[in-house]
Amino acid sequence: MMPVFALNEFLQHVSLRTGIRYSETVGQMSGSMELGPYSETRIDDDDVKIVGRTLYTYFGSVVKKFSPNSVYQSIYGNAITKGEGLKNVDITREVLNFLAKKVGDSLYWNMWNAVRNADGTKTKDLFNGFDTITTTEMSGQNAGISVENGNLLQLDEAIDSTNAVDILKTIWRKADPMLQREKCKLFVAPSILDAYNDDYKATTGAIAYNTQFKQTFVEGSENRCEIVALANKANSPYIHLTTKQNMLVGVNQKGEEETVAVEKHEAFVLQFIMTAFFGCQFETISKERLLVTALHNGE
């Protein structure tokens, strides 16, 4: 569970799905049903459609060697220097916790830009991040994310401290009315939030309701559009406006395939072994739940 805990900054803004091994079909229903004046013959023949998407969790592994004796003469020294006892000394447990957190940190930093590569060796190769999924959905003749579909906005100017407020307000106002009814997350790079704060301060000055420098919601959204600035989105070419429920992070945490173990196959060296499932996906890319803004020149 430690790698998942290390993702807490990100997970508070998305939906965590547990118990997923390899894949789970998710999606959104579309259709309508209305009452009309009484009729014994009128039948609504319009089908209810379910547009399915697949949340893949990929099986990953890592083996890390560590020699407790390498720190024997340090402040972490321990009297047990060989045998199975190496697996139970204090420094071994501390290193295990440290490494498990590092696994979570690596997942965090690759959450947007990871690209699945089965032959790779790093976290960036384990799964497809949200930006990667976005780019894929924008490509091809039948692109799922497009201006025509109402879920893509193309910016023709860079965001800076002179226009950030107007641009973020424009993004909110371009969103589908159904999306505007929801509590939304606007995922941006920290530099964009800095620009928004600077622009907001310069624009509003010392008016009565401007009581703090840090703004956490887009002006005019009635606190329905929260600005979420994450360090791992610093180099993203997109801004994502969506709901917490639509951003899915899949793990297992329940199956026998997932393992965290300390093994000793050599006289003085331990192996930290971890296997786990991980992946992410949008529940739907329909305009009612998602608006992607492509930054000018991929800024």
Image (tube, rainbow, N blue to C red):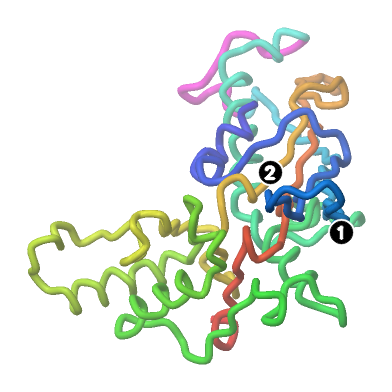
Query: Nearer the viewer's eye, disc 1 or disc 2?
Result: 2
Q: Kindly tell me whether residue 14 is visible in this rendering.
A: yes
The location of residue 162, given as percent across then percent down, is 30, 85
Q: In this view, does 298 lie to the left or right of 118?
A: left
Residues rendered magenta in the picture: 71-83
First in residue order: circle 1 vs circle 2: 1
Circle 1: residue type:
Asn
Seen as rendered, the residue at the extreme right is 119
Q: Main secondary structure of the magenta part?
A: loop
Observer-nearest residue: 218 or 45?
45
The quadrant in which residue 92 appears is top right
Residue pointed to by mark 2: 249
Return the residue at label 1: 117
Tell whether position 79 is magenta. Answer: yes
Q: Residue at x 68, y 52 (%)?
A: 37
In depth, the one of 85 and 125 nearer the eye is 125
Name the kind of residue labelled 2 in the image: Val
Residue at image coords 85%, 57%: 46
Q: Where is residue 194 in the image (x, y as percent from the top left)?
A: 33, 69
Q: In this view, does 284 lie above or below 136?
A: above
Q: Which residue lies furthest to the bottom in this view?
A: 156
Q: In this view, does 240 lie above or below 31?
A: below
Quarter of the figure with the N terminus: top right
